[in-house]
Image: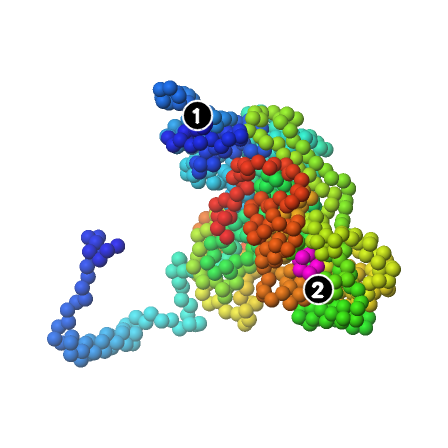
Amino acid sequence: MRADDPCLKQMKPPELSLADRFFLPQIAVGLGVTARHIAGVMFRNKAITVQYPDEKHVPSPVYRGVHRLNRDEKGRVKCVACMLCATACPAHCIDIVGATAPETWPDREKYPESFVIDELRCIYCGMCEEACPVEAIELTGLYDLTGLSREQMIFDKAKLLSVFDATSNQEPMKYGKPPERALGSPTTELAPG
Amino acid sequence: MATIIINGVEYPIPEGEKLNAIQMAKRVGVDIPYYCWHPALSVVANCRMCEIEVGAKDPRTGEIKFLPKLVPGCQTPAKDLTVIATDTPKVKEHQRMVMEYLLLNHPLDCPVCDQAGECGLQDYSFHHGQAVHRFVEERAVNPRKEVSSGIQLNADRCIMCTRCVRFTREITHTGELQVMRRGSHAEIDVFPGAPVDNPLAGNVVDICPVGALLDKDFLHKQRAWFLSKHDAVCAGCATGCNVSAEENRGTLWRYKPRHNPHVNDYWICDEGRYSYKAANSPDLLTAMYLKEGEAHRPTPVDQAIKAAGDRLKELAASGGKVAAMLSPFLTVEEAYLFARYIKGLNPANVLVLGPVPVKGEDQTFTPDMTKGRTGDTSFIAPRPFTIRAEKCPNRRGVAAVLQHFEGRVLEFGDLLDQVKAGGVKGLFAVSSAVEPWIDQETADLLRGRLDFIVVEDSILTPLAHQADVVLAGATFAEKAGSYVNALGRLQYSAASLPPRDGSLPDLDLAAILLNHGASPVSSKAILAELAAEIPAFAAARGAQIPEYGIALEGASAGPADAAPPFVDSWFVPQGAARMR
């Protein structure tokens, strides 16, 4: 694009008045802003910070925090191991081992034998969620992610499913039916997923 | 000169070849989409994807007249004054309609389908199809079934191109597969108790343009776009089939055939197809060893090589004769460097060819123009495919190197005779085989009569347990170099895996022992050296090896010595698979 392109809108910085060029009046204006905020917090309860961890901030619904692996209506892992999330991932933090689905799942061809996300390497861009064709991987609003070692921050399939069990009441799945049975108690017959 | 007009441009037709419109258009860079046609199979024209406008030019008036209907390109001969149009609105509309029709019952399970990323249906949907689906009825769901112990058929993905059926009838002449029932109930199937178990069965998976026929060995393991492809040569037998070795994260996942009209045409045998597994074996040597007393101690690579080199030099200086065994699994470059090293120590040293594994008999499939053929065969150049009994890739190449240095080719039996006669003091066995090649008895015999034994190998053999120095070498997947196949064709095989920890490819080992200078040593430079020195390799002078290899002096006539024909697009890396 050229500098004289008619599509370009030319902008100029505002002209400074004489008072602006002395700076001192502007310093007073700035101090005034600070004083207004102090007064707002002290007398009108307008603080935007919270007393963490006594109070928890609730992020917006589109916040991208820790991943979870959703379950289908039978409580099995929804993921079909297509590896599109691993393909889309710019940080290469997803590692999936696919396998042929067990005989007891006639409606399914493939499932993830192992599904591992390195939460330390992840940049929380949400591309995996965008890429997923079955809405199996979602980013939750959990932001207080801590661990005592690097190994603890590498989430396997069981842990990612437990994130789903822990968050599915507050943040229901965007698509599809939720599992029918009580959450967090998959029975032995569903052991593979 | 005969000319053809394609999309308004006149092109000369190559002499002496019988091409159809698809092949001719491809030569000049015009793609005509197709599914059911395959250059090695007869034309049945049942997918209707390649239909184009065909006409003729009147030689006197120059007037062009088109046929009123579209004609399949696979059936249209490229002959003088033919006019074809592949980009008219009529053709485009037809391609869009055929795509919609093929996708009526095709399940949209690309995410779990192994063919995704190298699928003809995906590629052509993208180029010629449409995004909407007007079919409101339920899709037909056909069951998954097994057509053999290694091949699964997902019948609902099938588009009834019948390539697999024609392959079993026309190439292997076994005819296990057929179309059952008719119309929209048609299904590919086998008779009960008659699975597709011929030695070339795996090829039906490769020629399937969609994900209907699947190799269970690879099923659900990797996605096609993760694999890096390396142009290798199969080391399973002396045919030297061209394969694409597909690797991801340090593991070899599969072999797919590469087209070479002089060697393997479009096929590979199942034995070769699954021979890649040896390269992933957990039993491969991962360290070099020195013998101390009765035990072997793992030793750093440089020390082990130095120990072997020093001791061999001492032996040579004291006048002791050393024998070197060069196995037929070595590349010609490696054989050349090892031979030069051993002969450089002492010209009296002996070079012998390692044991040549032979299993069964040669098995040749000879498709011809008539047997099993059901359709139009006018564009086919049938080529035989042979599975050799000689289960090593390079007997001929190593023998040619030995012939040059030794003046004759001594067999492994001759070595044993010489050892028994007591003329030999030391042995340098370079094996690099992936299967055991020596028994305990022979190893004991060699140990009992020799002062010093160095073994270079990729697996542990009885001789390695007895050796003074064990050098860990590369498997067929870890080394780059040239092989001479049974017909005398020199072919280059690229490395598909990095060397294992603790090992060193044989070419580097030999270069270090020889103090060759160049580091790291390149197989191409060595091939140039050897071609300049050994007359038998004169054809490879300059080490410029073309895609289909070089016929060395004295090579027997191959299946095809004409110009390279059309390459079926399923054998060319497609779409995303090409990007990595």
Farthest left residue in view: A18
Q: Which mark is residue B14?
A: none
Q: Secondary structure at mark 1?
A: strand
Q: Secondary structure at mark 2?
A: helix
From the image, tell me which residue sits under label 1: B82
Between B185 and B25, which is closer to the camera in this rendering? Answer: B25
Asked whether, in this view, residue B527 is left or right of residue A28, the answer is right
Q: Which residues are magenta?
A: B334-342
Who's the residue at 52% across and 63% down the image?
A118
Who's the residue at 46% across and 67% down the image?
A144
Amino acid type at mark 1: Thr
Farthest bottom residue in view: A24
Q: Which mark is residue B344?
A: 2
| 2 or 1: tag closer to the N-terminus | 1
Residue under mark 1: which chain is it in? B
The secondary structure making up most of the magenta span is: helix
Between A70 and B262, which is closer to the camera in this rendering? Answer: B262
Q: Position of residue B30 (x, y in %)?
A: 43, 36
In the depicted structure, whether residue B45 falls above or below residue B462? above
Quadrant in which residue B323 is drawn? bottom right
Asked whether, in this view, residue B10 is left or right of residue A117, the answer is left
Quick check: do tags 2 and 1 share a chain? yes
Q: Position of residue A130 (x, y in %)?
A: 44, 52
Asked whether, in this view, residue B300 is left or right of residue A47, the answer is right
Quadrant in which residue B130 is drawn? top left
